[in-house]
Amino acid sequence: MHWLVTEEEQAVEELAASGFNTLYPNVWSRGTTFHRSRWAPIEPALERSGARHDPICSLTEAAHRRGLKVIPWFEYGLMEPADAAVVQANPEWVLQKRDGSSSVELHGRAMVFLNPAHPGVRQRFLGLIGEIVQRCKVDGIQLDDHFAWPVELGYDPFTRDLYRQSTGREPPDEYTDRAWMTWRRHQLTDLLRELRRVLKSNGSGSAYVSLS
């Protein structure tokens, strides 16, 4: 543990000496975290290392002592490996195409997108971000282009039913239909608004949200 903390201190010291003023550590990737989380499994390599500390909190403390800001990068956003435990346990959380398929290939691995309109997905996503913002006192968060709703998706039973309740209509067969695209975009925007409310309610209102 002492060796790992020393390495973090050294890395931050070198970055500060090189003129960097903001660090963007990756904290969420391929369905795993680089910190201990109640919402998702930790990166296997970090688990195998036996690390007992929280690397992101340690890095943030080292950075703040040198006047650097830390903005964690949630790289994979709402994307999860198709075989992830959370996907297998909650298949109703997954967005689908018209033909019922859901997976996309990324770096040779089958991935799926979780539904930003589903309450369970929202709770998990807000918890995943809120816990690290509150625990590590970071300066903001960086979301990714994987925090998205691909235009072909939205024909899963949950979304179809929600759209019917909201509009009284069936989702159109053409996924680029303007009204259909606008409605789905609003679901994603609502999640961002809820994220802002969560950050404010836990005393992290100064942390800002950025999209890459």
Image (tube, rainbow, N blue to C red):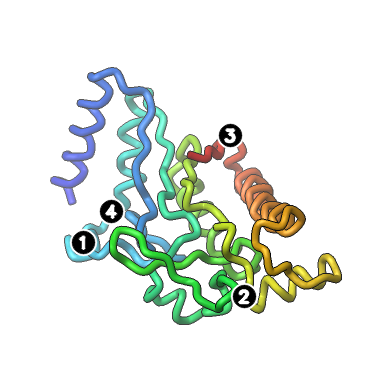
Q: Position of residue 60 (x, y in %)?
A: 36, 38
* Residue under the point 51% across and 47% down: 134
Q: CA distance from mark 3 to mark 2?
A: 37 Å
Q: Quadrant of residue 119?
A: bottom right
* Image-based side of 162 in relation to 60, left or right: right
* Residue 211 vertical position relative to residue 13 in the rendered view, above or below: below
The mark nearer the N terminus, 2 or 4, is 4
Ranked by sequence position, the earlier of labels 4 and 3 is: 4
Which label's residue is closer to the chain start, 3 or 2? 2
Question: What is the spatial separation of the Cα atoms under label 4 and label 3, in whole angstroms?
Answer: 25 Å
Which marked residue is nearer to the observer: mark 1 or mark 3? 1
Label pair 3/2, CB-CB below 8 angstroms: no
In this figure, which residue is indicated by the disc labeled 4?
Answer: 53
Q: Is residue 122 left or right of residue 65?
A: right
Residue indicated by mark 1: 45
Q: Which residue is mark 3?
A: 206
In this figure, which residue is indicated by the disc labeled 2?
156
Residues at circles 1 and 4 in contact by the CB criterion of under 8 Å: no
